Image: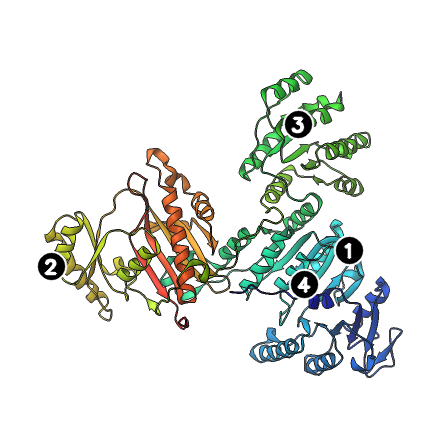
Amino acid sequence: MNPPVFETDSLSALFSPRAIAVVGASSSPQKIGGIPIDYARRFGFEGALYAVNPRAAQVQGLPAHTSLRAIGEPVDLAILAVPAALVGDALEDAIAAGVKGVVLFSSGFAETGAEGAAAQARLAARARSAGVRLIGPNCLGLMNLRRNVYATFSPAPGVGRVAPGRIGLVSQSGAFGAYAYAMARERGVGLSLWATTGNEADVQLADCLAWLAQDEGTDVIMAYMEGCRDGERLRAALALAQARGKPVVMVKIGSTDLGAQAAASHTAALAGDDAVYDAVFRRYGVLRAHSLTEFFNLAHSAAVAGRPQGNSIGLFTLSGGVGALMADDAAAEGLDVPPLSDAAQATLREWVPFAAPRNPVDITGQVTNDLSLMERSARLMLDDGRFASWMGFLAAAGASDAFWPVLRELVASLRAAYPGTLLAISTLLAPERRAEIESMRCLVFADPSEGIRTIAKLARLPQPGEAALPLPSAAASGATIHLPSGTLGEPEALALLERAGVPVVAHRLAHDADAAARAAEALGFPVALKIASADIPHKSDVGGVALGLQDAAQARHAFDRTQAGARRARPDARLDGALVARMVGGGAECIAGVHRDPVFGPVLMFGLGGIHVETLRDVSLRVLPVTREDALSMVRELRAFPILAGARGRPAADLDSIADALCALADFALRAGDSLASVEINPLIARSRAEGGCVAVDALVVGRSGAPAPH
């Protein structure tokens, strides 16, 4: 599988054009065809600007051309502000004129229904065949703030412009994008590029992410996503941003019901699409924001301070209560708050006998009598603890004119002495003072809890150059497996998984009652018996399961009883006898599976099993491929992990065997490739090492209909 190729040179014609033409140009700066011209002239676009309007001689002081071809000069970007019925001819004119990129404002395409979608597909195919990149249709356009490119009809820049900066912002929604632009202006957040992708006939959000990942003028990427139709492309773009050390902050809305497959597989029901997006974001270090405030806090903080070089934090406060609050927040967010050494604590007590010197360090209001205490205490903390981050709560002192020089000197001194430490303060500062502190790469928060939460999320960012795993590839996993369409019988499913390396319960297939008795005797009592039928995935629903059978007679009776019950409940189902398996005692029931997500492909799931699996929904997910460390992390991040770790005197489960089973399951899914719809082990009994580790007791494998057989 070859990764997607992002043609950044062709995208640069869209995002950083040297010559722009507006087709459907209007003399009114309030109309869609007039706003881009007004912005370009008013805001100082330094490239060539052309107006195309066959019914006018001049447009806003520019000579009007009858067509793009009539311009006679190179045009990088054409803005099409014409009705949908005229877009086809305008695109042909652009192709003939050698235009490299098109921004298509026009609506009336895929958003209107099947006919509009077909027209949009034809446009996209024509542009693609001619090598023209197209953003839209039905989009609000784009802005390159560094080059004064305003290829948009949004009114937001007319109200007030955002300053050029090093944060790129991409939105699938024009309305959200316009509001986010206004928020950036109000919060003083500088932008490098602002783009809306609309219907995404050609350029997708992923393409914009990839361009920004390689843009030297962008350090942080903000993105708003409503959905994705090309998961492989999005993953490749996020991997590129991760490799380039560009933090991505994402707002992702919406969730869908994955539908009928959930009836046959718990995995499909539990791996809802929003949870899969979370798994993708986790894989590539994307910071997911759940509000506009968090969206801007994370992006701005990442741009100001970057990623801390670890998970430890030193907390400094002038208030014991707020110090405790910050410590609680840090613990809840998974930050490490290690205590200072005994020697450092003794020194702090010498300076302030009633200080709380452990960490958080509270030097109380004594600082008002000796302002040098702040810097001395902070330096002592950072020299002693070598914290990755340091945050100081200074109450309302920042609002004091008398205190301001002390605060400024404190931050400047700490930044010079500890250049690799993430610094943050919580106090009240006027905007211009806040900007000065942030210019020294020190974060400022009015709310200390907000500061802790932000630092914790920044600490989860991957290190620059820390590449994620490649996209799934069966070739990397060994010989391929081709599954037939539909549900496999359980004996066949267990055999496939056993060959793949998943530990499977000892079992035998019996075709009559006597064979069931012989199988039970060979396996050793007690045994379980269940009907073998690919047509009945959930055997217990039809009385097709018998547990704890103690002798051959019970095995014979159970065979006859379960067969008869299944025939009554499902007379249409094919019965292939019964599976006799050794009873597995002890351990905790878990569930493991792989579901083929329609956007991102195979997704591995693990959680506690049994009757509560869909009620509690305590599961962890990873998009494939996975590492063994991924598998261990999936187990440890469950809320119910203490049960597996040996809560209340229970023997601890063998985590290594669970991780091995998950890796084997993932490898099986990769080798099955497109022929796999889902595979599920429920239950996977997690036992201690002394008990033999985990073992699969029940398996369900569903082949994907219509999947081509390998050559």
For the C terminus, the image quarter is bottom left
Q: Rounded to the nearest whole Å, what is the CA distance between mark 1 and mark 3? A: 40 Å
- Circle nearer the N terminus (4, 3): 4
SS assignment at label 3: helix
Check whether the beta carbons of the residues at disc 4 and disc 3 lie within 8 A of each other. Answer: no
Q: Please, what is the three-letter code of the amino acid marked with disc 1?
A: Val
Q: Residue at x 64, y 60 (%)?
A: 210
Disc 4 and disc 3: Cα gap in Å? 49 Å
Q: Which of the two discs, 2 and 3, sits closer to the camera?
A: 3
Q: Is residue 262 visible?
A: no
What's the amino acid at mark 2?
Asp
Which mark, by number, is residue 383?
A: 3
**Which residue carries the number 1 mark?**
162
Residue 685 percent location from the top left of the image = 31, 47
Per the rendering, the mark at residue 514 is 2
Decide: few, some or many residues near mark 2? Use Cα within 10 Å; few <14, some 14-19, many ≥20. some
* Left or right of 400, for residue 382: left
Task: Name the residue: 34% across, 53% down.
Answer: 501
Front label number (4 vs 1): 1
Q: Please name whichever residue, 458 or 402, is drawn nearer the observer in this view of the structure.
A: 458
If you read the primary sequence from the N terminus, does the residue marked by circle 1 or circle 3 appear first?
Answer: 1
Whether residue 115 is visible, yes or no, is yes
- Residue 403 in the image: state x and y as whole percent: 79, 30
Residue 175 tag number: 4
Q: Which secondary structure, mark 2?
A: helix
Question: Residue 411 vs residue 337: left or right?
Answer: right
